[in-house]
Image: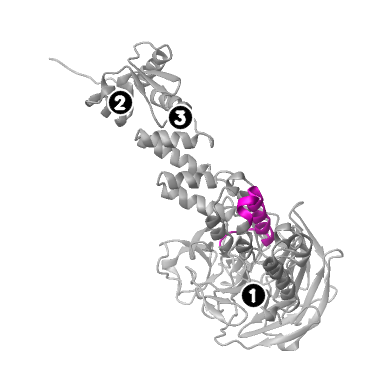
Amino acid sequence: MISSKEIHVEGGSSHVLSKLNSQRSSTKYCDVVLQVGDDEFPAHRAVLAACSEYFDAMFSSQMKERHERNISMKGIASDAMEKILDFFYSDIIILTDENVGDLLQAASLLNLLELLKIINDYMIEALKPTTCLHFRNLGRLYALENIVKQAECGLKENFEAVSLHLDFCQLSVTELKNLLSSDDIRVEYESNIFVALVRWVNYDPEKRSKYFTNLFKCIRLQLIPTEYLAEKVRKEPLVRACLECRDLVEDAFLFQVNPNRFKTQNLREGQIIFADVKSNFVLCFGGAKMSVCNVCDGKWEVLSIPGQSDFSASSPVVCGRATVFCGGPQSSPSNRVSRFNGRMFESFVPMKTPRANAATVCLRGDILVFGGELSEHVMYQGRVPNQSYSRLGTQVGVQQIDSGCKVLANDFERYDSTQKQWEVVGKLLQPRAAAAAVVVKSYVYLLGGYNRVQDMGSNRNPRGQKLVCDVVEKYDSTANKWSSAKNMTQARASFGAAALNNIIYCVGGHDQNLAQLASSEFFDTTTEQWTNFIIPNPWKGPSSACNNGDKIYAFGCSTPSLYTLDATEHKWNIISSNESLTTCQKIVPVYWKQI
């Protein structure tokens, strides 16, 4: 009886390919020579035809190259031809930022689909400020839409870094104007955009000076500090040579003196309020009441805004010149988001999840909302089944939530300012509500609040009571990863927190027994150490704090008073009290209105 058996030899085909590559190096059995300029590359027709439909068609058709030993290759760089042959014979390709353009051209000409995909993936991974303009041009040339889209985003996200490279100076005047006019480019300071414009013009001043005035109008001079306007912008020769430009600078000075005479220029989508940008006003709100305090003289003004809602348990965040309120109220958590521009409330995209008492920050123009309290209404449309939340100290799926029973959310979502939509980013390390969140560099620190609900009851902590924690967690926004940080010295919820010079200040709130805290502490993010300090004029109960330029302000609603921090002596000094503000709970700096 005849039997058969299939035997597979590991590495057999790769060994054959390796032998063929060795033969190519010594020109042994090579039956074709590819000529690129003055360089010659011996190869085997069978290998070329097996690896490329282009060569297969060439050698199997009636083309003259079918019988020729020497074949001239047009439109391919010599180095690219060498690397592609290495790829045919070894399955290895070495890509660099410098050779990717030549290889893309060669792979497109030879219709090497596998190599094109490899190059496409490399360009996505290698996209950075030094390459995004070059890769964008390649993407446009070879119809790689995903490369063009990613490069455009990289250009806007890293405008300042991109503008330092030679590719930026080679932009056309139309491309540059579109960029300078865009709300989406993200820079720390508007002055950096002015510097980029001057650099572009001076790259070829004879041809480009005539475009300066039209491009200069795209600079939002109102957002540039007066010192920089006086010392840099006004003295720039390109500005001095143009009467219209000088008038625009003068208008910017006048805006600082009397802003009501001018139409306010908007911050760009991702522009951040930095320490040298300061407002003299703080917005204080809670319930259905809003007031503004002038921190210079301590005077208050009550705002009466049409369409104003109940802001209890809503989470405020300043984005550009507007204040955005997320979620709330306490009685019925919702996914509503309202944007207040100082004159009226504007419609805004609702969150994915109804929340109350969440923690919010604005990071690089995007809004991040962490945790919060949910209710039975969180049988969401679009919510993933069995996603976990904390209720009664256990992990339960949303399908099991009892009617009216509040739970603590353990996820967080982001409003993408580029896509204009919310997305659930991921989970927290543990559920959290009534916590505080602050930004330090590219990190978000999530501090304190409630992190679970009591399961087994006791005299001190009844069953169902929310438990206050001292937990601190750190979110790396670049890597989208969470890590634990050193806990606070005091467990606290509904308290104020703000950061200044890499130091996080926490104040007030209440502890597990709902005892109102008249204490303050600060965390040095460089040494990772907490330090307590005394409040000379203590307030009690729920508190709020915010960074406003180079100062930190805090508000205690039970007092109720507004304080400013002396960061040198770690001391809170009272600015103003207002007995009518007992319902107010939170404060934010005002950038939308000059009173």
The answer to whether 425 appears left or right of 571 in the picture is left
Return the residue at label 1. Answer: 264
Q: Which of marks 3 and 2 is nearer the N terminus?
A: 2
Q: For numbered disc 3, what is the local secondary structure?
A: loop
How would you classify the magenta stretch by its main secondary structure? helix
Between the residue at mark 3 and the residue at mark 2, the CA separation in whole angstroms equals 22 Å
The answer to whether 480 appears left or right of 17 in the picture is right
Q: Nearer the viewer, mark 3 or mark 2?
A: 3
Between the residue at mark 1 and the residue at mark 3, the CA separation in whole angstroms equals 53 Å
Would you place residue 197 above or below residue 74 in this image? Answer: below
The 10 Å Cα crowd at callout 1, few under 14, some 14 to 19, many 20 or more, is some
Q: For numbered disc 2, what is the local secondary structure?
A: helix
The answer to whether 578 appears left or right of 390 in the picture is right
Identify the amino acid type marked 1: Thr
> Which is nearer the eye, 37 or 507?
37
Residue 283 quadrant: bottom right
Return the residue at label 2. Answer: 50
> Which is nearer the eye, 154 or 489?
154
> Which is nearer the eye, 237 or 579?
237
Q: Can residue 442 be seen in this view?
A: no
Q: Which of marks 1 and 2 is nearer the N terminus?
A: 2
